[in-house]
Image (cartoon, rainbow, N blue to C red):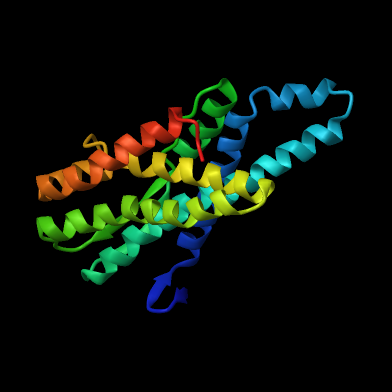
Amino acid sequence: MSAIGSIRFSRRELFDLVAAWLILSVAFTLFLNPGVLSRWSYAPDPAAVIAAFGESLVTSLLTVGVGFMLHELAHKVVAIRFGQVAAFQADYGMLFLALVSAMAGFLFAAPGAVVHRGRLTPKESGLIALAGPMTNLALVLVFAPVALLAGPDIASIASFGVTINLLLAGFNMIPYGPLDGRTVLRWSRGVYLAVAVPSIVLAIAGLFGPGL
């Protein structure tokens, strides 16, 4: 058993978190570099292809991976604050699907979730759900000034971090299925609209806009 402050993690949970972080980052890297595996086999300079893939993987680890990890940890921290027994559980079937879909040219990513036990009020459930997307929006505020002020290489990574975290926030606020937005909406329509509308609008702008 390990701990960060008062937050405890089992060895299994830490393994699941790291595995999901790495696999999800690799999946995004494959998705963003279509055909990289086939190009590597016949490229005049395979080392250059590997180097480019490695750079893209580092970007994914620092943006997609960090956004995912902190999103899930936010759920866990708030759940524990409300007296829950909470732990992240990776879904290895879905992680495998993420890799396969990325190689096929599209990406379906549902790496796992924080599972918690205990009695909750609708407000507490809503706040636990809201913690993840709000963390991604906070990361946007961290990445954005770096994207605007840093040198080209760092700015490129930070700009991608802005886009990814906008997408994570906006997607998770969709009020459907197991997504966070559905739980938030059940608790408070006003809070849902206040967070979901700008999150989804910014996510669309981040995806289709000119970027920072």
Q: Between 160 and 15, which is closer to the camera in this rendering? A: 160
Query: Is residue 171 visible from the viewing direction of this image?
Result: no
In the displayed structure, does residue 144 sit left or right of residue 170?
right
Residue in the picture at 62% in, 32% down:
30
Q: Tell me if residue 190 comes above or below residue 119 in the rendering.
A: above
Q: Between 10 and 82, which is closer to the camera in this rendering? A: 82
Q: Tell me if residue 182 comes above or below residue 134 in the rendering.
A: above
- The answer to which image quadrant residue 172 occupies is top left
Q: How many marks?
A: 0
Which residue appears farthest toward the front when viewing the image?
A: 149
Q: Tell me if residue 170 comes above or below residue 137 in the rendering.
A: above
Query: Is residue 207 visible from the viewing direction of this image?
Result: yes
Residue 79 image offset from top left, x and y in percent: 26, 64
Residue 171 image offset from top left, x and y in percent: 34, 37
Q: Tell me if residue 115 comes above or below residue 180 in the rendering.
A: below
Residue in the picture at 10% in, 60% down:
121
Which residue appears farthest toward the bottom when viewing the image?
A: 5
Residue 106 image offset from top left, x and y in percent: 50, 24
Residue 17 image offset from top left, x and y in percent: 49, 56
Which residue appears farthest toward the right when viewing the image?
A: 44
Residue in the picture at 55% in, 28% down:
102
In the displayed structure, does residue 115 sit left or right of residue 90?
left
